[in-house]
Amino acid sequence: MTLWFLNGIKKGIKTEKNPDESMFKPDYPSVLEGKSSYDCPTGAISNGTWIKEKCIFCGRCDLRPTGNQNIYNIHGKMPEIFKRSFYLYPIDSGTCGACNAELKSIFSPQYDANRFNIFEAETPRHADALVIMGVYTNGMEKIIEEAYNAMPDPKIVIAMGACTLSGGIIGSGINKKFNVEIAGCPPTPYSIISAILRYRGD
Amino acid sequence: MKYYKNGIKSGRLIGKYKNYSIYSEGFISVMDEESRMYEKNPDEINFAYGPSAGGLEESIGFTLQTPGEIIKNVDVNPSYKMRDIKIINDDIYTALLKIERVNGYHAASNSVCFLLAVEDALEIENSDSNNERIIEIELERIRSNLHVIKGLCESAGFSVPEKQVSYIIERVSRIISVSFRHRFFFGANLINMVNGNIDYVLKEIGDIEKEFRLLYNDLLASKIFMDRLQENGIYKDVNSIGPAARAAGLKYDARIDSKSLLYDGYKICTYSSGDVFARFMVRSNEIFSACDIILNTGIKKHYMKKYDLNKSGEGAARIESPQGDIFYYVKIDHGRISDIIMSSPSVLNLYAFKKALPGNIFTDFFFVWESFGIWVSEMGVNFI
């Protein structure tokens, strides 16, 4: 017989410390620096300037990764009421599946987003934030609208990934107002947690 | 095309794409047979679930016909997030960026299969890089199978093992990131070249196997877990692929029956009961066999060569992705894609799910769904 509680205790604490200190930080995606005249297929390099929202981090240009994963934009400040618990409702507009997987990863033991009072909601009715992922698709437009309308006030919208922000390499982005915009293809779990904490003012 | 014939129905059915039926040795253009409509009894109700709901990782709609507890029939609509991907007239490397994003969680399988088809079309010798590709795909298989097992633990409400699997998944993602530059293999594959260094994979993979084996033994010792999986979602059909076929005792595996990417001396893992438990067993054993393959596949050191891609031709390839056979056909006209056919394993797996679910009760739904490892993203793709 397996006693899961004891089994879990035996494994010890696997959660890493403060995200800014010890979390695993891959090169891609991260802030890119340098100059490049590469003819970027997503238009992420314009007159030598890097546009993070359009970048799919394919690594084909001369820009070099810095490892800094703070690749997000914050608009406004999180309502006070969300500081003690913040429920995310993910909605897939047209993803390749990678953003979905990375969002799930923030709840893995290494990151454990629950300790920052970040949780996943099972329905938009219990959600504080709608997390939109993927390119614009006809079939999901009405569903996203309905999910947003079903959420109680106050509510915010988080856009996750290059597809949502700009269409990336696949299609068109989602034409909505976002409170938090997280770039990356897909954004790493670290980027997602860091963006939410920054929005909260932590 | 070296190994496949257009217009010939030969071998086993591995998938469908638009009006093509794809077989293991050829593909033919046929219109889909009209599927038989389910006749609902007056005492049954339609229960709609999705396309966006807690418990669903991707957008997909289900309509369950039920008189109360037992599920009599299920209709599935995977087209909500249908993506039109403009790929015709793209050069090969621009097309590759899009192929990687057909199914990001299986980007290695998709991009390797696409490149094998391109190399077939342009008659590029590719033996230098195929062993590295095998390692890449097996690493992807480990993560993908763990993802399915995580879904089964979640369905059973087993939070401790679910978190333990999540922990191993994240470790594998980090191994992929360190070795192949990106957590989802984006940018790792080129013509006859893998952009990666497998030293770190070889260093860490033994630990992953050890960690998973402990968890696997604990799960097998849990009678409650076994009880939820056994005799649930039974599916045995010769028109199945991947772990679903092998869980029904069928020795179907592109690792031994496709010439595109052959594995030396690979022994197929099978189980006979065809239920969720059998699919769990096959997936788990394939994690162990993947670790063995990674440790025992030798790598040829080679350097990037310059190839003339401004050529024309048609090529096809089939490999064993974590969910089953994946197939790409490409026609290239002076270095640009002029036609493409892709058969995703999730199409036949979805068909299998629809057949396996009726007769089960509502609480079995997630076990059956998770056990097939279906990805909606790769089904909802329309290349234009």
Image (cartoon, rainbow, N blue to C red):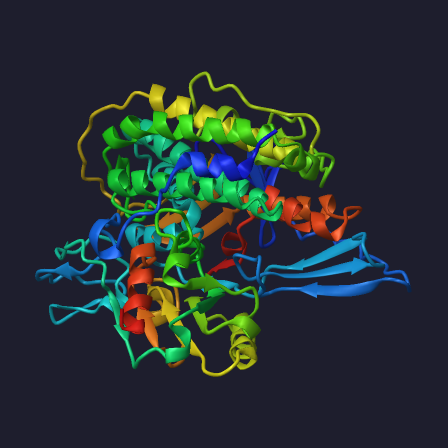
Which residue is outermost to the top? B265
Image position of A109 (left or right of B370): left
Q: Residue B42: x and y, percent?
A: 91, 64
Q: Residue at x 56, y 34 (%)?
A: A3
Residue A69 sits in quarter: bottom left
Instruction: Tell me where residue B168 sits by quadrant.
Output: top left
Relative to B221, is B372 above or below?
A: below
A84 is higher (above) or lower (below) than B24: below
Give the number of callouts. Answer: 0
Q: At x 47% / y 31%, what residue is drawn?
A: B3
Residue B175, position in %: x, y? 30, 38
Q: Nearer the viewer, residue A53 or B316?
A: A53
Q: Nearer the viewer, residue A103 or A174?
A: A103
Q: Nearer the viewer, residue A121 or B346?
A: A121
Q: Is residue A133 left or right of residue B122?
A: right
**Furthest-left residue in this view:** A35
- Where residue A49 appears, as percent x and y from the top left, is 13, 69
- Which residue is at 73% across, 37% downward? B234
**Quadrant (top left/top right/bottom left/bottom right) for the C terminus of chain B:** bottom left
x then y, percent, for residue A82: 41, 74
What is the quadrant of residue B243 in the picture? top right
